[in-house]
Each structure stands twice: as C-alpha cells, then as structure tokens.
Image (spheres, rainbow, N blue to C red):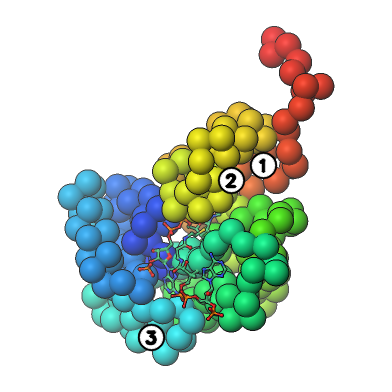
Amino acid sequence: MTDHVLFISGGTSGINLGIATGFAAKGGKVLVFGRDPVKAAAAASQICAETGGVAMPGSADVRDPASVKALFERGVAELGAPSVVIAGAAGNFMAPAVGISPNGFKTVIDIDLLGTYNVFKAGFDVIRRPGSMIAITAPQAEQPLPQQVHVCAAKAGVNMVVKVLAMEWGQAGIRVNAISPGPIRGTEGVERMAPTEADKAHWSRAVALRRFGTVDDIADAAWFLSSNEAAYITGTILDCDGGMGLGDSTGDWLSLPTR
Ligand code: NAP
Ligand code: COA
C-alpha cells in the first residue's frame, strides 16, 4: 500500500517524525503536528526534502479537543481522509513523587492519556474504513519505574484505551493498536531518562538485545501495523523495545556464551 494518508500527533520530532518520514518515503501523505507551528513547518519541510513526498504541518494541543478536530478537518481538505491516525505526542520528566505537584502529575496525564483519547476521538470522525489507529505507549505502562509515577500511570491508561477502543471500533472497520518503544537513540525521551553517558550505558546493558533502538525500528513497526499484513491484528501492544519490557537483562549470570 502506498496511498496511505497519516495524521500523527507529535510528528514534529523524534520517534514520530521518524514514523512520518518512513510513511512519506513509501509514498504516503502525512500531517505532522505539535504545539509549536514553527517546529511543525520545519519538520514538514525536512520530510519533503528527504523523501520528495507530501507533508503538511499543523499546530494543535492534544489537550484541547477542539483544536485537534479543527486541524483534522483542514487535513482532510488538503490531503484527503486519513487511513492511519497515530497518537504519539507525550510529555515526560524525571522526578520523584514528592517533587511532582498535582499540576505536574495532571500535565502528563493530560498530554499522554487524555491527549491520546482526544486524537483517537477526532480520528474516528474522519478516518477511512478500514483504518488503523496506533498509540505510542512505553514500557512504563507495565513496568513500574521510580521517578516516573506520572508517566507509568498515563501510559498504563493509554494501553487500556487502546484495548477498549479496539473492542468498540472493530465493527466499524478500525483497528486500534499500540507500539511500545524501548530506549530510542538520539531522542528527547532518552535525553530526559538517561542524560549522562553512564545512564545511557546502563540502559543499553539492561536491554536484552544490548543496544538502543532507532527511529527506523519504530517506523517499520508502525508501517507493519498499518499494512494489509496486519489486517487481523487489533487491541495489541506491540513491544518494539529490544526486550526492555521483559525486565532488566543486566547480570553476570546472563553472560553466557553467544554460540
Ligand atoms: P519528542 O521528540 O519530545 O516528541 C514529542 C512530540 O510531541 C513533539 O512533536 C512535541 O511537539 C509534541 N507534543 C508535546 N506535547 C504536546 C501537546 N500537548 N500537544 C501536541 N503535541 C505535543 O519525543 P520522543 O522521545 O520522540 O517520544 C515520542 C513518543 O515515543 C512519546 O509518546 C514517548 O512517550 C514515546 N516513547 C519514547 C521513547 C524514547 O526512547 N524516546 C521510549 C518509549 C516511548 P511540541 O513541543 O511542538 O508540542
Ligand atoms: N519536575 C517536576 N515538575 C515538573 C518538571 C520537573 N522536571 N517539569 C515540569 N514540571 C511541572 C511544573 O512545575 C508545572 O507544575 P506547577 O504548575 O505545579 O509548577 C507542571 O509540571 C506543568 O509545567 P509546564 O511547564 O507549565 O507544562 P507544559 O504544558 O508547558 O509542558 C512538559 C509539559 C512539562 C511535559 C514539558 O516538559 C514538555 O512540553 N514536554 C514535551 C517534550 C517531552 O517531554 N518529550 C519526551 C517525550 S517521552
């Protein structure tokens, strides 16, 4: 399939920009948006320059359903109805619970959980059928992590939104899945979670495949979930994390011969 139209929140940087670039490189048209219109314009230009494809920039705050709805209507007018809607926008910071105010906790819940719901609801009104919706979740949805109480709670909620909407919207021809990336090289998320070289070394050792992922790893997973080959897959949380979700693979007892 090369006639995909993708609408992606958070598509203006990092993992989501990589997903959008992957779709555009394969002939799809993409609407990338975040809060900052300047960043969105730069991202769309970069996609067009790298792929020769079609990219429309947009600005909307996923916490504000009216702004998302209005942008999606403009997107349909310019690019046509989407075949794929991805809720990728998120906010994160490392802080212990005693250092997070009620508004700090609420801010991440609002962007990640309510924002995913708002993007999916706006997507439901415009998506082609059959269509594919994908949330970008995280291992923290199932794996408790200190200094991440807000993110763990938000992403756990995201996973449940995916599963319930998959049940409700399957009969409408809409598949709803999530991708759970591990630590992805060169992204804001990794810079926030692992700011020092020592932190990065720890995380790459803790992952079973002993390396950080790349944005292309996640772009390929998103392309697969939106393809005909995934036509019978819905309600799935696809771990694309090098085994991070299995738990911490660090440990001398794991230093086994590799062949
Ligand atoms: P990133 O580069 O910081 O991208 C975040 C994107 O979300 C930006 O486009 C940002 O644009 C947008 N955004 C933030 N708040 C928004 C809001 N309220 N409304 C609309 N857009 C908003 O992040 P990343 O590290 O690539 O992570 C992308 C996704 O992957 C997230 O869902 C994250 O939880 C997940 N993830 C990342 C990793 C990792 O290793 N990086 C691992 C697991 C999961 P503006 O700033 O212009 O709004
Ligand atoms: N530790 C504790 N609390 C923090 C914090 C930190 N490092 N950073 C922000 N907060 C709190 C603020 O103090 C504020 O609470 P308060 O009003 O009680 O003081 C609350 O969070 C909201 O902060 P604000 O800066 O107004 O939010 P925002 O909506 O402008 O930005 C963030 C949202 C905080 C998540 C911001 O980091 C962001 O925009 N992130 C997007 C990029 C990103 O996180 N990428 C990684 C994705 S994995």
Tell me if mark 2 has few (under 14), some (14-19) or many (20+) residues whose alpha carbon lies within 10 angstroms of its own.
many
The relative height of residue 157 versus residue 49 in the rendered view (above or below) is: below
* Residue 67: mark in rendering: 3
The reply to whether dot 3 and dot 1 touch (C-beta < 8 Å) is no
In the drawing, does residue 133 fall left or right of residue 38? right
* Disc 1 residue type (three-letter): Met
Q: Which of the two discs, 3 and 1, labels the residue nearer the N terminus?
A: 3
The reply to whether dot 3 and dot 2 touch (C-beta < 8 Å) is no
Percent from the top left, x then y, of residue 217? Answer: 48, 41
Q: Which of the two discs, 2 and 1, labels the residue nearer the N terminus?
A: 2
Residue carrying label 1: 244
The reply to whether dot 2 and dot 1 touch (C-beta < 8 Å) is yes
Residue carrying label 2: 182
Percent from the top left, x then y, of residue 17? Answer: 36, 55
Give the SS element for disc 1: helix
Percent from the top left, x then y, of residue 2? Answer: 34, 53
Going 58% across and 45% down the picture, which residue do you hit?
Answer: 182
